[in-house]
Amino acid sequence: MTRKGDQSMTSRKSTRAGEVGRRIGIRDVAQATGLSITTVSHALHGKGQIAPATRERVRRAAEELGYRPDPVARGLVSGRTGILGLAVGHMSDRPWAGTYRPYYAAFSAGATMTAVERDYALVVVPSDPASGLWARVPMDGLIIVDPVREDPLLADCARRRMPVVTDGRPIDPGYEDVPTVESDLEHGMAEVLDHLRDSGARRVGLLSGPEPDAYTQDSERLYREWCAAASRPALVETPAASEDPVEAALRLLSGPDRPDAVHGLNETYGQALVIAARRLNLRIPDDLMVSVMRESDQSCGTEDWDVPLTALSLDARRLGAESVTMLIDVLDGKAPRNVMVPCTVVVRRSTLRTSTSRP
Amino acid sequence: MTRKGDQSMTSRKSTRAGEVGRRIGIRDVAQATGLSITTVSHALHGKGQIAPATRERVRRAAEELGYRPDPVARGLVSGRTGILGLAVGHMSDRPWAGTYRPYYAAFSAGATMTAVERDYALVVVPSDPASGLWARVPMDGLIIVDPVREDPLLADCARRRMPVVTDGRPIDPGYEDVPTVESDLEHGMAEVLDHLRDSGARRVGLLSGPEPDAYTQDSERLYREWCAAASRPALVETPAASEDPVEAALRLLSGPDRPDAVHGLNETYGQALVIAARRLNLRIPDDLMVSVMRESDQSCGTEDWDVPLTALSLDARRLGAESVTMLIDVLDGKAPRNVMVPCTVVVRRSTLRTSTSRP
DNA sequence: CACATTGCCCAAAACGTTTTTGTACGTCAA
DNA sequence: TTGACGTACAAAAACGTTTTGGGCAATGTG
């Protein structure tokens, strides 16, 4: 009774030791070595004062039995799971178009790599609040990609004091303290607009988007500021939420003072501009220069178009990596500063006029 | 003492209720409603017999306090975490080339989508056993992509009775019972080889790979069987592990009885074949037809080559989806049958001779 | 010999739930 | 009046760890 490892739990459990298929736990190691589970735990993790011989004996027994501490139980006591969440939108669309958006693919790839390097695991959950998945999966913190207006996840995280960082600035007030990773649109937009101007564009337009996210807001604001600084008119057109963007492109290009260069806020809009230009018999780039924002340098299919488009290319991979680094910093108690990730302009044929021809 | 909710834990804890920043738990809801945690749990989950009024009172209090049951604690008692693991290789390579392999990207995208639809979360971990990450993150089951010879993960999973499915057949004996998702190479290889023959190829060669995985083994075996059935010679060349595949391609194409069509087991080998052909002044497709296995229909960059290559295209997205479905079936106690996912031949210029010219 | 120190180990608490097993009370039938 | 039964809740066990606070010898110290 006093000698062998008869900790209460151990002896109590021994009655059901005969069960088959049970996962082997720390109790089994304790029982095998005749020690207490306390000693086993300490021996395996290098804590406490354990005789070296005992430590080795425990090690061997654990190895032989194939024991691994249950991450769930360990997580319960430590309060840490080692899991980072990544909430992305557009995952409930059945055609899956969203998932394969190159931006998400590249972002999550970069995030996963960085998480693994820092010994965290990354789990992707839909930001759709209807799927309560994000609340059901244990995680230490959450990365929210492109928070929307009155984002339910953001609000929920704040309530539960769940550490959170966002990719793209939250647009609602009250979240100014949420650490954020952003693309450096300020320089990127200036660079691409300057490029259009330097390539000979007189009237630069913008095909904006209906989404109320920070990216759209900032892009449009920076465009208007650039126009104002250059004393040029701001020519902005925005497709309605469900409208074919080609219609908006046609509106933009049909006026008497039509732009001779347009920047589209995403690749779809770029395609819409190309289609609209063809319908209006505008040659690219001679009659109309087109540039687009590209979600990732990994974008597929772009080369398939008839005209390779000059692009302001976001570094989604690095944005993902920086988000993870930032979230881990938050978990470690550091209060990180916001991070700007540069985006680069890749010049292609759609803004390279063969001669300095003018329409 | 008898009336209000003075369950032992509740009263014991009340001393530390003053702490700030604590996550609010079921105890707080119990305290707020004056009920026991048992009743709260039952009320929130629709179990037991609770008066409708009480149930509603609990619901309201929980909502007001923003209570969500801790997934970790819940997982400890239920034994389920709702997390599926996906082990992929090549994640420790610092240049990250592996991660961006289209196969993994498409596979994990498909797997994530299906997991989410089935209310599971999916976490990607490196299959590198040095990183013990996969053992530290709680998961209900694991998908192992392309198990290698004497795969440590596979062995570990078997020891710990962790439910596991593989993408690609395990090559070691003893794992015949592991449920597996595979590409239907049997039909795919036949289709692409038949296509080469029907396009006029007399001598079809194979640029194989040094990897000892099931895909390479099966492809080579099927190729040899096809050759035998067609009474043609088998022309196989394999680059050494660290050799430039162009060298192997040159060997294959330099002999006196060189093949006039070659199938490469991955896109890199296809590129090597194109380079080798150019060096040897062989025109594609007139002097040499080239086809390749493509990891995914989402492959980037292929269009950039000078010659669009005919491809045997794997449906990585669907492979990922089927793997998840299969793993969930295992978790639900079903013993699923192995699944074959068809792969499709996409004919491009590299096997389309302009005329029926012969070298 | 009395007392502190050290080395080695163990029992129990704690983590936050769910599940099992009670218990008090009221109602109804015999 | 009594036993059976139903209702509405509570106590405690259980999940598998880690952490806390010792306990018990053996050894050293005065």
Image: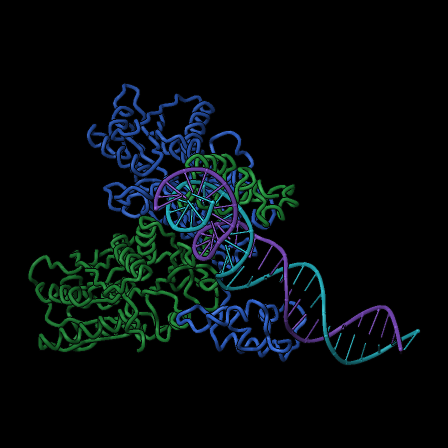
Chain colours: A green, B blue, C cyan, D purple
Q: Where does the C terminus of chain B fall, quadrant-wise?
A: top left
User: x and y percent of residue B118 in the render?
Assistant: 52, 57
Q: Is residue B244 above or below residue A106?
A: above
Residue at the spot x=6%, y=62% of the render? A356
Q: Where does the N terminus of chain B fall, quadrant-wise?
A: bottom right
Q: Could you say which quadrant of the image residue B245 lies in?
A: top left
Q: Is residue A122 above or below residue B344?
A: below
Depth check: give the residue in front, A56 or B269.
A56
Say how many tags the image has: 0
User: x and y percent of residue B102 in the render?
Assistant: 34, 46
Question: In this rendering, would B19 be left or right of B5?
Answer: left
Q: Is residue B117 visible?
A: no
Depth check: give the residue in front, B167 or B218.
B167
Question: In this rendering, would A240 be left or right of B177?
Answer: left
Depth check: give the residue in front, B222 or C26.
C26
Q: Could you say which quadrant of the image residue B336 lies in?
A: top right
User: x and y percent of residue B30 in the render?
Assistant: 55, 73
Residue at the spot x=26%, y=28% of the render? B243
Q: Could you say which quadrant of the image residue A152 lies in?
A: bottom left
Question: In this rendering, would B160 be left or right of A200?
Answer: right
Depth check: give the residue in front, A346 or B194.
A346
Task: Give the residue furthest to the top.
Answer: B256
User: x and y percent of residue B150 in the render?
Assistant: 44, 31
Q: Is residue A259 visible?
A: yes
Question: In this rendering, would A352 be left or right of B121?
Answer: left
